[in-house]
Image: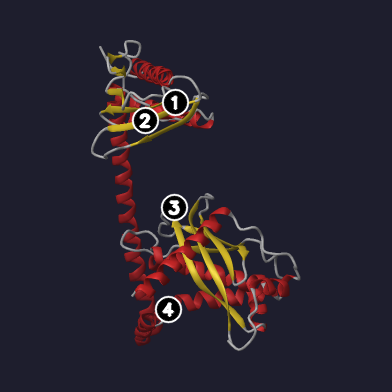
Amino acid sequence: MKYFNMAADDKGADPEIGGQLRRLEVMPLDSGEDETCVTFVLHGEDHTLGNSLRYIIAKNPDVVFCGYSIPHPSENRINLRIQTNGIPAVDVLRRGLSELTAMCEHMLATFETAVEEHKDTQNLEDNLYTQIMKKKRKSRDEGEGGEVCFIENEANVLSTESDLRIAQSVEWAVMGRVKNLILVFLAIIVTAVLLRRLLGVYAFIVPLLYMFFDVNWSLRVTWIVLRRMIIFSRASSPDFLEVFETTFIVLPSDIDLNLHMNNARYLRECDFGRINLWISSGMMRVMRKSRCGVTIATASVRYRRSLELFQKVFLKTRVIAWDESAFYLEQQFTGEDGFVYAVALTKNTVVQGNKREKFISPEELVHQLTGWNAPSPPIPHDLHLWIQYNSASSAMLKNALRLE
C-alpha cells in the first residue's frame, strides 16, 4: 500500500520516499535555484504528522533553519521551509521521513503486542495509556523532543481511551461542583441560624454592615496589624528583600458562579500580602516618619490554575527591585503541593502626603530602613518587559488623548 508521495521535482514522485507514511503528501512549493533552501507543502488529514516531521528535522545538525506556517486554518496544509548548511534539503527531508516512519512502526508494534497480551478491554486501555505516557516522559526527559505520531489504528484506540478519561474528568468536576454548592448552602443556613440565636433582632445589622462596608477587608487588615505589633514587640524586623508569607483559605464569599475563586479576589488578597510586607519589614514605620506612602500604579495577574473552595493557599510577597519613583513587587499564590496557581506584579509608586515637601525616593526609604547605600537589585528580564509594556501603553493613551 502506498502511504506517502513526494515529488522531488516537477517530473513526478520520488520512488525512494514512496510508501512510507499514510495520509501525508509532501510537494516542493517551487523548484528554487538553491537546493539547500527549499519550501515544501505538506498535505494531510491533520497537522500531527507534519508537526512531528518538523521537530525531527529541526534536530538535524545539518539544518540551519526549519520553520513552518499554516496558510489557512481550515486547510490541512503546512508550508515547511528547510535551510541547510550545504547539503540538499531533499536529503534532509528523506532522513526525517525515515525516522518518522520508524517511530510510527515502533508504536504500531507496541500496540499489537499489547493487544495479544491483554484480553480484557479495560486492562488494555489502562496499560496502553501507561506505556505511552512513560514513553512521552522518557522522550521529554532525555531531550529527544518531538510529538509522538500515531498511525490510524492506534489513534482510534487512543481516541477511545482519551474520551473515557475525559468523561471521567467531567463527571468528577460535576460531582465536585455539586458538593461545593451543598457546602455553601449549608454554610449560609448555619450562619443565619447562629446570628439569629446570638444577636436576636440585631442580626439584621450584620447584613447591613456587609452591604455598605467591606467588613471582611477591615477585619483582615486589623488582624494583620495587631499580629505584627505583637510579633515585633518580641523580635526585630526581618530583611526587607526576603519573602513575606501570608496564608488564607478560599471561603464561600470568595467564589463565583464557576465555584472557584473569583478573579477579583486575587487582587484583594494581594492587598493583604503587601500590607503584611510593609508592616513586617518596618517600611511602613519609615514611610510614616517621612510623611509618604505608596499607591498602586500598575497591577497585573497571570492565572495558571483555579483555586477551589476551602483550599489552603500561601501568598508569597517580595520586593523585586525599585527605581527613582516606585517599588516593584511580585506575589505568588502557592498551594500546599508547591504549585504556583497565579503570579501578580505590581508597581507601587511613592507619593508624598504634602506636595510642598521634598519627594523621598524609594532608594532613600530603603537607606533609612536598612542603612544600605547599594542600588536596587538587577531588574529581571520579565519585569523589564512588563515595565516597557506599561510605558508603551501610557504613551499610546496620551497620544490618543491629544488626537481627541
Mark 3: few/some/many CA within 10 Å (<14, 14-19, 20+): few
What residue do we see at 35% from left, 81% from top?
A: 211
| Dot placed on the residue nearer the N-terminal end, 2 or 3 | 2
Which residue extends farthest front? 33
Q: Nearer the viewer, mark 4 or mark 1?
A: 1
Residue drawn at point x = 66 percent, y = 61 percent: 242
User: Which corner quadrant holds the C terminus?
Assistant: bottom left
Residue 353 seen: yes
Q: Label 1, label 3: how many angstroms apart (C-alpha)?
A: 32 Å
The amino acid marked with disc number 3 is Arg
**Chain-order first, disc 2 or disc 1:** 1
Q: Nearer the viewer, mark 2 or mark 3?
A: 2
Label drawn at residue 304: 3
Q: Earlier in the sequence, mark 1 or mark 3?
A: 1
The answer to whether residue 148 shows anywhere in this view is no
State left or right for residue 10 relative to residue 389.
Answer: left
Q: Residue 133 in the image: x percent, y percent?
A: 43, 30
Name the disc covering residue 80, or none.
2
Badge 4 or badge 1: first in the primary sequence: 1
Residue under pointer 4? 214
Q: What colour scheme governs how the chains and residues are painted in the rendered image of this protein?
A: secondary structure
Crowding at dot 4, Cα within 10 Å, few <14 / some 14-19 / many 20+, comes out as few
Q: Quadrant of residue 197?
A: bottom left
Q: Are marks 2 and 3 in contact (CB under 8 Å)?
A: no
Assign a secondary structure to mark 2. strand
Disc 1 vs disc 3: which is toward the camera? Answer: 1
The type of residue carrying mark 1 is Ile
Total marks in image:
4
Image position, residue 54 (x, y; %): 40, 29
